[in-house]
Image (cartoon, grey):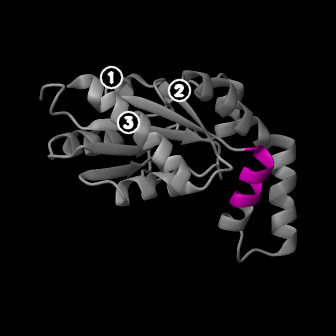
Amino acid sequence: MNNLNKPITIAIAGVSGGGKTALTTHLATHTNNAKALFFDDYDLDGPDDVLEWINRGANSHEWNLEPFVADFMELLKQPLEYIFLDYPFAYQHTQMKEFIDLAVFIETPLDLALARRVSRDFQNSSGEEIVAQVNHYASHGRRAYLNMIETIQPDSDLLVDGTLTIESLADHIMEKGGEYHRGRT
């Protein structure tokens, strides 16, 4: 497939609760000829202990992305204009690096991201369970959030403000994606 016919692939990264899934879903459903893949939909071989993995340097190549890549390759065969990825590694994993045209990082304040995550993941939990999760974040989990900011954010092409509406973020990303598309023709 030549570069002019290849869909523009936009990878969306950010911390947990940063808005990746909501933004990727919005982009895929509000853009003509577009589809999305979501990293969290895959049961990938990777580190058993994410915090230990981060302490060892968070080498993205410890994750086997073959199922994700296989599905991505199938999407490349379709007559799409865009493929949106809810994908945490930006350009850092060689199995996907060459396919990404634009890597976006959602800059969401950590307090807002944590609040979103607690609201999303612990709706039916007891107060004690929620307090335990917040304490875990404070003592250990925050390191994972900071790692994303330290490693993936600088590797991204476009930083967007995670406090804005999904619609505003999508408009900004599509403006940049359109600039990329015009540059290819």
Expressed as whole percent of the image width and height from the top left, the position of residue 3 reads: 18, 25
Looking at the image, residue 49 sits to the left or right of residue 170; the answer is: right
Main SS category, magenta section: helix
Expressed as whole percent of the image width and height from the top left, the position of residue 66 reads: 33, 37
How far apart, in angstroms, are the residues tagged by discs 2 and 3?
A: 14 Å
How far apart, in angstroms, are the residues tagged by discs 1 and 3?
A: 17 Å
Residue 156's disc is 2
Q: Is residue 61 visible?
A: yes
Q: Which residue is drawn at 55% across and 22% down?
A: 155
| Mark 2 closeness class: few <14, some 14–19, many ≥20 residues within 10 Å | many
Which comes sooner in the sequence, label 1 or label 2?
A: 1
Expressed as whole percent of the image width and height from the top left, the position of residue 177 reads: 38, 36
Give the residue number, with chain letter if any, for mark 1.
98
| Mark 3 closeness class: few <14, some 14–19, many ≥20 residues within 10 Å | some
Please state which amino acid type lies under the numbered disc 2: Ser
Please state which amino acid type lies under the numbered disc 1: Glu
Looking at the image, residue 2 sits to the left or right of residue 140; the answer is: left
Q: What stretch is highlighted in magenta?
A: 109-117
Residue 148's disc is none
Q: Can residue 58 be seen in this view?
A: no
